[in-house]
Amino acid sequence: MDLNNPQQLEEAKRILLIIFLALLAGQGIFLGVVSFLHSQGFQTYAAPGDVLLIVAALLTVAGPARLRPEEFGASRSGGSAAGFFLYVNRVQAISQYTDSNSRWRVYLSAVILRLAMLEAASTANIGFYLLTGDYTFLVFVTLLLVLFVIARPTSESFEENVLKNRFS
């Protein structure tokens, strides 16, 4: 993708938005289906010893690990701890590439990794709510969805990480 071409630059930004919206919509649809099932009297099961609650809490606590990404050269925070560090790692690797196509692919993979880590934790919590009917899992889902929206790719992040120093 030639990011020197204004049309392809806008297409790259549109691709990032489509990926974000598709992942967000998937979580929303899954949550809607699960909520519908519960409204229709879906049979739930109690997890022995609240094991699922502990696992969900660990997934969610790992999610909002909020470090200042500027210290690591990244432009935005949000995401699971693993997603955050993978994102920062990938964004730092962008400077190794001089051609815009390679820079774009590395940035795209960084964004997808960060959003996927958040989506995985959110989807697991929705699944735990499906199994148990415990509203605590919905609190975790809400927190993760807020973080997911905060972690969305922005034009500023794209320009800072992909377009800066592309001619150096």
Image: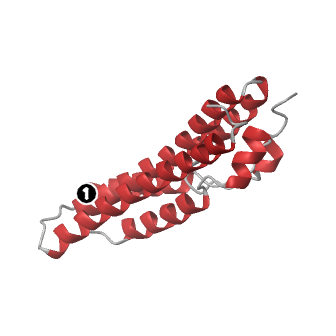
Residue 155, quarter of picture: bottom right
Indicate the position of residue 163 as horizontal and vertical percent values. 77, 40
**Would you say 63 lies left or right of 101 here?**
left
109 in relation to 63, above or below: above
Residue 86 vs residue 54: left or right? Answer: right
Task: Tell me the crowding category of disc 1: few under 14, some 14 to 19, or many 20 or more residues within 10 angstroms, Cα based.
Answer: few
Observer able to see residue 163: yes
Q: Position of residue 55 (x, y in %)?
A: 41, 51
Instruction: Decide which of 109, 136 is in the foreground and name it.
Output: 109
Going by the numbered disc 1, the residue's amino acid type is Ala
Quadrant of residue 100 in the image? top right
Front in this rendered view, residue 145 or 168: 168
Residue at the spot of label 1: 47
* Residue found 58% across the figure and 56% down from its top: 152
Q: What residue is rendered at 64% in x and 37% in y? A: 107
Q: Quadrant of residue 90?
A: top right
Q: Is residue 105 above or below residue 64?
A: above
Q: Quadrant of the N terminus?
A: top right
Q: Is residue 161 left or right of residue 15?
A: right
Give the secondary structure at mark 1. loop
Q: Residue at x 25, y 70 (%)?
A: 35
Q: Position of residue 110 (x, y in %)?
A: 60, 38
Q: What is the residue that sits farthest to the right in this orientation?
A: 168
> Which colour scheme appears in the figure?
secondary structure
Quarter of the image that includes the C terminus:
top right
Q: How far across and how far down the image is residue 45, in percent?
A: 18, 61
